[in-house]
Image (cartoon, rainbow, N blue to C red):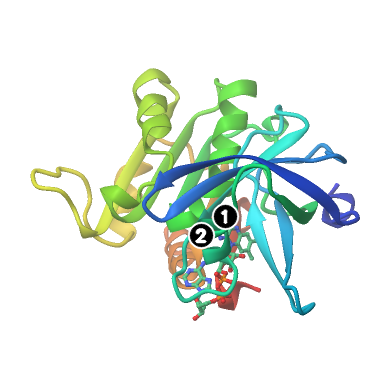
Amino acid sequence: MHERANRPGPWQTALVSNVIDETYRAKTLTLELPAWRPFIAGQHFDVRLTAPDGFQAQRSYSIASPPERTGAIDITVELIPEGEVSPFFHEIVRPGDRLEVRGPIGGPFTWNSNMGGPLLLLAAGSGIVPIMSILRHRAIAARRVRATLLYSSRSMHDVIYRAELDDMDASDPNAAIWHTLTRSPPDGWKGYSRRIDETMLEEVTRDLDDRGWTYVCGPASFVELTANILVDAGRRPESIRTERFGPTGR
Ligand SMILES: Cc1cc2nc3c(=O)[nH]c(=O)nc-3n(C[C@H](O)[C@H](O)[C@H](O)COP(=O)(O)OP(=O)(O)OC[C@H]3O[C@@H](n4cnc5c(N)ncnc54)[C@H](O)[C@@H]3O)c2cc1C
């Protein structure tokens, strides 16, 4: 499965059919794909930009939408102000534009409802994107599978998909959503306000059977730290799947 899933397929020209603001620095783009192919939650696409002088830049973006949706995918891009590519999605791209993409790509960082659970999902920043595809797939295909998400953001204004996550937490008895806000928690905030640590993980997983799967996604430093805590706490390394975003993740 992984070998086939890792073949990115040919480049194709996607139509940007919708762009929405998720937060002040994260936008979701809907890409209509003329050669849509089935994918597994957790996979990503490559996007290639070509400047008028022929210079090309290529970056990876995880699929946010669930595999049940055919013909189009959503990607969510966080703005890195000094970045080469992400500002293009924030300042230039409009509905009706076309983008060169290829995918789906990615093997181990995937979850299919047949794999069962329970699921422990740990995300920081835009690391929530592939995890959202997993949560959306689970909500459609496997609501009986328990899922616990611990999502680290700088502040409430940085929480991507906030309304959908709140709704999931309130309406789905098998889903538990926890937030930690590392820089500026709002007045009266009763949740966590520090980086993920052993005590926090112990608290959020207290009622969760540890024989399931763990997915960790975010900046490389977050992923290293969190995966080490999990292993030290006795989680089986083979049950932990990681995806690193950012420069050292390539
Ligand atoms: C498999 C995979 C999936 C990804 N999925 C997503 C996704 O769903 N959404 C998303 O927004 N990004 C995602 N990324 C990151 C994305 O590919 C780019 O790295 C990111 O958009 C920055 O590109 P840039 O050209 O704007 O910045 P660059 O020009 O590459 O970098 C500019 C500066 O920002 C720093 N930097 C680069 N990336 C990050 C980062 N992620 N966080 C903090 N600092 C950074 C660099 O060190 C550099 O100093 C994914 C990466 C991988 C490997």
Q: Which quadrant of the render holds ligand 1?
A: bottom right
Judge the density around disc 1: few (<14), some (14-19), many (≥20) Cα neighbours within 10 Å: some
| Residue 214 appears in the rendering | no
Query: Which numbered disc covers residue 236?
Result: 1
Q: In the visual, does 223 lie left or right of 110? A: left
- Where is residue 154 shown, x and y percent of the image? 30, 59
Which residue is drawn at the image coordinates 15% and 43% (left, top)? 190
The amino acid type found where label 2 is placed reads Glu
Between the residue at mark 1 and the residue at mark 2, the CA separation in whole angstroms equals 43 Å
Residue 42 x, y percent position in the rendering: 65, 47
Is the CB atom of the residue marked by disc 1 within 8 angstroms of ligand 1's nearest atom? no
- Say which element carries label 2: helix
Give 234 or 93, whichever is nearer the viewer: 93
Nearer-the-camera pick, 52 or 109 = 52
Instruction: Answer with the quarter of the image where residue 92 lies.
Output: bottom right
Quadrant of res 28: top right
Residue type, numbered disc 1: Arg
At 77% from the left and 46% from the top, the residue drawn is: 14
Judging by the rendered image, the residue that carries numbered circle 2 is: 91
Label count reads 2
Name the residue located 54 percent from the left edge and 48 percent from the top edge. 129
Q: Which of 88 and 66 is in front in this view?
A: 88
Counting residues from the start of the chain, the first of labels 1 and 2 encountered is: 2
Give how far across and how far down residue 210 sits, in percent.
Answer: 50, 42
- Secondary structure category for the residue under label 1: loop
Up/down of 129 relative to 100, above or below: above
